[in-house]
Image: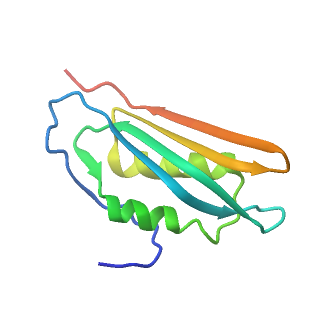
Amino acid sequence: MSTVPSRELATFANPRPGRDYEVRFDCPEFTCLCPMTGQPDFATIRIRYRPRARCVELKSLKLYLWSFRDTGAFHEAVTNQILDDLVAVLDPEWLEVEGDFLVRGGIHTVVRARHVGAPLPG
């Protein structure tokens, strides 16, 4: 299995598709670059979701988050990109991504983006 950054998110079948449960990840080593200065931004990315048919595989999530390390992105953009990419592969009932960025220039930034999927048929 690869150990280089990758934007590919792997999934697996939800082992309990009829059960109402939440999956939560805390990723405290996230880094990207400030698009204005090129300096690193450090954050904890928190992901919460209620799966439908698919769950995200953790090593692919780790490599996916690592892929942002050399990417210049505003906090709002990177948080929303993570949300969009996870929603695209998971089609969850709901999903939330929170980017909790360390202080830069005296400002602590928290960006929270949410997705609520369409209701299940029937």
Occupied quadrant, residue 21: top left
Rendered location of residue 65, percent (x, y): 50, 61
Q: Is residue 88 left or right of residue 112?
A: left
Image quarter of the C terminus: top left
**Residue at image point 80% right, 43% down:** 107
Q: Is residue 97 left or right of residue 40?
A: left
Occupied quadrant, residue 39: bottom right
Which sits in the foreground, 119 or 70?
70
Up-down relation of residue 83 to residue 59 (above or below): above
**Residue at image point 49% right, 44% down:** 46
**Residue at image point 42% right, 63% down:** 62
Image quarter of the N terminus: bottom left
Query: Colour scheme in the image?
Result: rainbow
Rendered location of residue 104, percent (x, y): 79, 52
Which sits in the foreground, 41 or 60?
41
**Residue at image point 52% right, 54% down:** 28
Up-down relation of residue 32 to residue 105 (above or below): below
